[in-house]
Amino acid sequence: MTRILADLSEEDVQWLDAQAAAQGTSRAQLLRDAVAAFRADASKQGIEKYFGIWRDRREVGDPVAWQRRERASWTRPWDPDYWDVRKEFPDLFDADDDREAERYRKKDAS
């Protein structure tokens, strides 16, 4: 095993020492683990690199429901599926949107 010399700020060294103490390991082992994790991540390509990056996010609740709601928020009154989306997510739209959708519906009908 090769030894290296690295300069870290005092704040980073204190944080590293606290992490080592909390995990019951050495500072050197934490650094070895960090380099191994970095190498494993850096070797991933394409979709593999990003697949599952949201798996630990808890603030969004159900990720599929969150994604559906986000996409629904992009719906505009002139979109053909406006009324279907509005029915599913009524709080994303208001009376002005409905009036605009009706205007476009009438325009398309003529």
Image: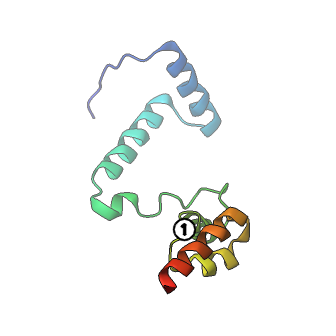
Q: Which is more toward the observer, 47 or 30?
A: 47
Q: Is residue 94 visible?
A: no
* Image quadrant assignment for residue 81: bottom right
Q: Which is more toward the observer, 57 or 85?
A: 85
**Circle 1: element type:** loop
Q: Residue at x 39, y 47 (%)?
A: 37
Q: Amino acid at mark 1?
A: Thr
Q: Residue furthest bottom?
A: 109
Q: Residue at x 54, y 66 (%)?
A: 76
What residue is pinned by disc 1?
A: 75
- Residue 10 x, y percent position in the rendering: 51, 13
* Image quadrant assignment for residue 4: top left
Q: Residues within 10 Å of mark 1 (few under 14, many from 20)?
A: some
Q: Residue furthest top?
A: 10
Q: Residue at x 67, y 54 (%)?
A: 59
Q: Residue at x 29, y 26 (%)?
A: 3
Q: Is residue 103 left or right of residue 88?
A: left
Q: Which is more toward the observer, 47 or 92?
A: 92
Q: Is residue 31 visible?
A: yes
